[in-house]
Amino acid sequence: MKAIIAGGGTGGHIFPAIAIAAALEKQVPGIELLFVGAAGKMEMEKVPAAGYKIIGLTIAGFNRSNIFKNITLPFKLIKSFFQVRHILSSFKPDFVVGVGGYSTFPVLKMAQAKGIPTFIHEANSFAGKSNQMLAKNATAIFTGTAGMETFFPVNKLFVTGNPVRANIIAASHTREAAHHFFGLNPNKKTILIVGGSLGANSINEVIHNNLDAFASLDLQLVWQTGKTSATKYANAATNYSNVWVGAFIAEMDMAYAVADVVISRAGAMSVAEICVAGKPAVFVPYPFAAEDHQTANANYLVNNHAALLVPDTQAAATLFNTVTALALDTTQQQTFIKNLQPLAITNAAEVVAAKILQYLRA
């Protein structure tokens, strides 16, 4: 059996794709998998690191902040279809899975035109335009949350949850080991700050401007700054023994183990991981996400009394007080932890793989 997994652009697409690939390998020993992503994007690094082959398409997404940068977009899209036609003809997949991102649309659209079964995984609480357009001819659609009937045909819809990285599900690290890893004190409250691989300026500036205040409250920080301005923030934190700072945290299982409270953007995978890790969180949704889907993702937890939300525009004024109040309020933390438990899904990848195979064998 052969399969193509298409998508990427962010960790929120790549890590579920890798989890689904691993589940397919487990359920179909010997299956041959090929990833298709966007050339120059992070999947071209992360997928080979996970042990899979990937081909990059010459494609880009619509630039909402600068419309002039979209001039070459039609040409890139046309070129990507030619590339996909060659990939499908040479690899001959039995089915194709799309997880979102630039490369999903041309791969699944061309596969559907050739009569190849296609499966979609939509991680967000507000479906992307590409997935909505592909849904009509998809074999089945898997979603991270319920209530997606607005976007997809009900008869094709399955709520599976979002596939989470295996090491986060395993949660094998003790609090003491995690604090030792980051060089911090296990007897003190610790806040984990994650704003994505590039960083979140609004979050980072709040942390930067309140380093003295965190220290005075005896709170520790594990601060993933992202690549943008990483040096600036690393230099700012140099003299603070209560702060671990780095551009990127590869060992997210350790990061969740060290955290009493998390500050995070609200990408679908961040939300899913926080549910599985069972960590009280303050979400600051990225305001320019398509259809404001990060706010929808965060509200899924907020409406279940399992997290707090601070709008990006209010971060400078309210984020520090909101997160420190939560970090010092053990009772509210326990309430959130209790309410997160029914929202945690640990077998999503296995369910997606099993459903795909069920359709193929029908």
Image (cartoon, helix red, strand yellow):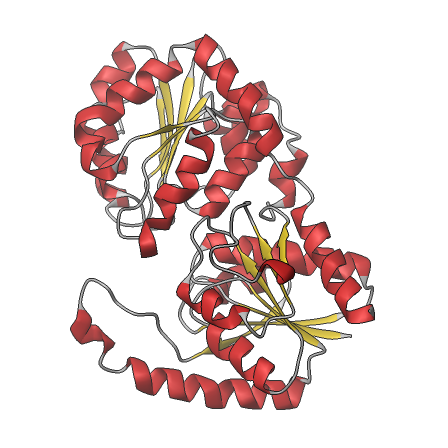
Q: Is residue 316 above or below residue 324?
A: below
What is the x, y in percent for residue 114? Answer: 62, 87
Could you tell whether 335 is left or right of 161 in the image? left
> How many discs mark residues in the rendered view?
0
In this rendering, position of residue 28 left or right of residue 265: right
Which is nearer the eye, 297 or 21?
297
> Quadrant of the rendered structure where residue 146 is?
top right
Q: Examine the rendered structure and indicate whether residue 82 appears above or below residue 281.
A: below
| 202 relative to 33 in the view: left or right | left
Q: Is residue 47 above or below residue 299?
A: below
For the C terminus, the image quarter is bottom right
Percent x, y of residue 9:
43, 62
Which residue is painted at 54% across and 33% down in the image?
275
Residue 180 in view in this figure:
no
Q: Nearer the viewer, residue 34 or 329?
A: 329
Q: Position of residue 65 (x, y in %)?
A: 19, 62
Which residue is at 30% across, 80% downward? 73
Q: Quadrant of residue 340?
A: top right
Q: Is residue 272 visible?
A: yes
Q: Is residue 46 above or below residue 282?
A: below
Give how far across and how far down residue 8 sits, in percent: 48, 63
Q: At x 69% / y 44%, what residue is drawn?
A: 347
Quarter of the image that includes the N terminus: bottom right
